[in-house]
Image (cartoon, rainbow, N blue to C red):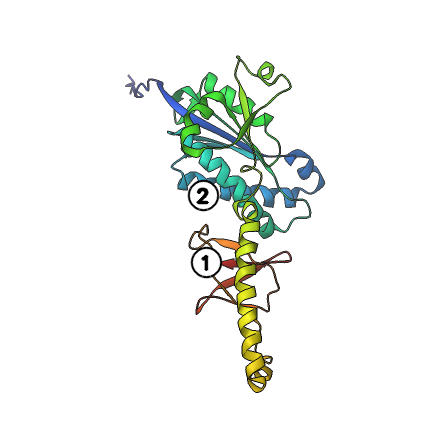
């Protein structure tokens, strides 16, 4: 007579909760993959690293990776949208790193609502809406629903515009969708480039005037100084975060200083980047 062992699996009851859901994917990935699968995979790996790093910084959870995309969960709509903006800002640096002929762009959508959690996965109408909203975003853009906009408006103060063309007809229910303007598609350093160039130009002009005055009074010293490497001394702009890279123009032969402290430099295309 054979014994029978009955293994009881703990009953896991699905849990309902509110969550901000972010979907992101690489725009035009299928076409990119058909042209060069190896380069497409390299682009996907780079975007995956960036998405995971941004999710960690903004207290998000990677629910699952979806081929060339990802589904993320946040307890806060503010953190979800901040993560989306951070990803889009960092895409410029990623494209410099990847050095692909065609720049990689990401589409992102965010919705907040009631979801069902089961076995570490999320289900429900809010998930379906977030997936549809992300498909409405332009390459390099971020789309959000009105529910998200209402929650982030007093904190992030973003400029948004309604998505037209019958956007709500593509959703499982009547939902108003907004496109985040400016900040989602334009990296922070690029948005503030005129300010940076103005600050650099002012410092450079002051330095040039002092050098000309010194040269006129001491020709011998002026001749000797021409043999030294070119140097540029900068005032740290008030908008630059320590450790952040920002553009100053010029070539890599320049020696850049913040006061008397040498600054780290690198070239991004034809632009000299300086690390604060």
Residue 42, disc? none
The picture places residue 255, in percent across and down from the top left corner, at 54, 69
> Callout 1: helix, strand or loop?
loop
Q: Is residue 255 above or below residue 182?
A: below
Residue at figure coordinates x 55%, y 64% from the top left: 204
Residue 53, disc? 2
Residue at figure coordinates x 59%, y 85% from the top left: 219
Q: Which residue is mark 1?
A: 236
Q: Nearer the viewer, residue 102 or 32?
A: 102
Between discs 2 and 1, the one toward the N terminus: 2
Residue at figure coordinates x 56%, y 33% from the top left: 181
Residue at figure coordinates x 52%, y 63% from the top left: 203
> Callout 2: helix, strand or loop?
helix
List the single residue furthest toward the top. 173
Q: Residues under labels 2 and 1: Cα distance?
A: 27 Å
Q: Quadrant of residue 200?
A: bottom right
The quadrant in which the N terminus is found is top left
**Residue 89 in the figure: left or right of residue 57:** right
Q: Nearer the viewer, residue 66 or 168?
A: 168
């Amino acid at each position: 007579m054979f014994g029978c062992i009955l293994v009881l699996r703990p009953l896991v009851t699905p849990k309902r909760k509110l969550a901000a859901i972010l979907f992101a994917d690489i725009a035009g990935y299928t076409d990119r993959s058909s042209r060069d699968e190896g380069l497409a995979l390299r682009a996907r790996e780079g975007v995956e690293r960036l998405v995971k790093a941004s999710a960690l910084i903004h207290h998000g959870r990677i629910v699952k990776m979806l081929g060339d995309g990802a589904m993320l969960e946040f307890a806060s709509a503010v953190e979800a949208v901040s993560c989306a903006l951070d990803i889009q800002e960092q895409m410029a640096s990623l494209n410099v790193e990847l050095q692909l002929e065609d720049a990689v762009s990401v589409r992102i959508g965010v919705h907040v609502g009631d979801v069902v959690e089961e076995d570490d996965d999320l289900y429900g109408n809010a998930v379906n809406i977030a997936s549809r909203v992300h498909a409405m975003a332009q390459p390099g853009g971020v789309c959000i629903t009105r529910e998200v906009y209402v929650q982030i408006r007093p904190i992030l103060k973003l400029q948004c515009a309604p998505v037209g063309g019958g956007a709500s007809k593509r959703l499982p229910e009547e939902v108003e969708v907004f496109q985040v303007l400016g900040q989602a598609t334009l990296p922070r350093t690029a948005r503030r480039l005129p300010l940076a160039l103005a600050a650099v130009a002012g410092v450079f002009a002051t330095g040039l005037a002092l050098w000309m005055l010194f040269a006129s009074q001491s020709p011998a010293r002026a001749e000797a100084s021409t043999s030294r490497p070119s140097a540029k001394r900068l005032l740290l702009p008030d908008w630059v975060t320590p450790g952040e890279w920002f553009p100053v123009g010029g070539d890599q032969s320049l020696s850049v200083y913040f006061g008397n402290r040498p600054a780290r430099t690198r070239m991004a295309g034809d632009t000299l980047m300086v690390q604060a």
